[in-house]
Amino acid sequence: MCGSDGDINGNLQVKVGITGAEQFGEVEEWFNYRLSRAAPETCAKFLGSFVADQTSSQFTKGGKWLVWKFEVLT
């Protein structure tokens, strides 16, 4: 994905400071809410988003994260 980083737990961070990344993140969030309502059986359950309130080894303060339910296919 353009302007974003993901991890194996179903989290996606919109990169801070990249031109257009914030708008891309807003569209990505809207699209995932829409897809989860229109065709929930086609993808992992979208849980929403949050903005990190502090910097840590995984999060950058002010970074917006999109979150999906982690699913294991068997």
Image (tube, rainbow, N blue to C red):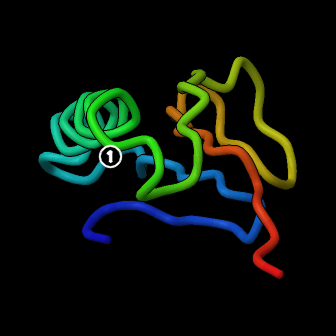
Identity of the amino acid at label 1?
Gly
Name the quadrant of the C terminus. Answer: bottom right
Residue 29 in picture, x, y percent from top left: 34, 33
Residue at 61% over, 29% down: 47
* Label 1 neighbour load within 10 Å: few <14, some 14-19, many 20+: few
User: Quadrant location of residue 34?
Assistant: top left
Q: Is residue 6 above or below residue 70?
A: below
Residue at mark 1:
17
Q: Is residue 50 toward the left or the right of residue 53 in the image?
A: left
Q: Nearer the viewer, residue 6 or 70?
A: 70
Q: In percent of the image, x 51 and y 65: which residue is there?
A: 5
Q: Quadrant of residue 56?
A: top right
Give the quarter of the figure containing the N terminus.
bottom left
The residue under the point 16% across, 35% down is 23
**Horizontal side of residue 16 vs 25, given as left or right:** right
Q: How many marks?
A: 1
